[in-house]
Amino acid sequence: MTLELIIRYLHFLAILLVFGSLLVEFVLVKETLPKKVLKLLGKIDALYGLASLLLFGAGLSLWFWVGKPAEFYSQNPIFISKFVLVCLVGILSIWPTIFFLKNQKGNDEDVVNIPNYIRKIILVEVVLLLVVPMLAVLMARGVGL
């Protein structure tokens, strides 16, 4: 098995982990949550963060190290759009992460009010991530070259 195949597999696995953990966050976040659930959300968010780092690292490796020449990606506006969307999702994820970290300490039975913007941010992240595979399909079809 070549290094490129291993990196592509890790990239694909990271995509699944990022989307799956984000979807679980979206399903679990309600108007009010006990701290016990916030602690669970913190663990899920940590998985999301680790998977995002793997995704970013594998993606950069595919772009600049193994596989097609960097120009193939760098000159494709579809790829640049895909990259920008993923970066935007990463930036948006900062707010829920900070909220989860700040509010998970204390008695497991204490209830925390979840600001509406947290759920909205997670929803926007999910929607943006749903666009990324479409852009990948367009790239695979040669659109943007």
Image (tube, grey):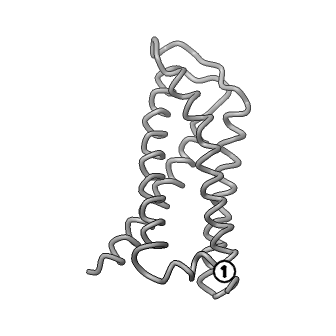
Residue 98 is drawn in which quadrant? top right
Assign the N terminus to one quadrant of the image: bottom left
Image side of residue 46 versus residue 144, left or right: left
Residue 62 is drawn in which quadrant? bottom left
Out of 115 and 55, give the one closest to the viewer.
Answer: 55
Residue 43 is drawn in which quadrant? top left
Assign the C terminus to one quadrant of the image: bottom right
Tell me if mark 1 has few (under 14), some (14-19) or many (20+) residues whose alpha carbon lies within 10 angstroms of its own. some
Q: Look at 65% across and 50% down and name the residue there.
A: 125
Q: Look at 55% across and 34% down and name the residue there.
A: 97
Residue 18: percent from left, percent from top? 50, 53
Image side of residue 6 versus residue 96, left or right: left
- Dot 1: element: helix
Looking at the picture, does residue 55 appear above or below residue 3? above
Q: Amino acid at mark 1?
A: Leu
Residue 44: percent from left, percent from top? 46, 40
Q: Look at 70% across and 48% down and name the residue there.
A: 124
Image side of residue 144 versus residue 107, left or right: right
Give the number of callouts: 1
Residue behind mark 1 = 138
Looking at the picture, does residue 69 appear above or below residue 41? below
Residue 80: percent from left, percent from top? 65, 69
Q: Look at 43% across and 81% down and name the residue there.
A: 67
Residue 76: percent from left, percent from top? 65, 78
Residue extending farthest left: 1
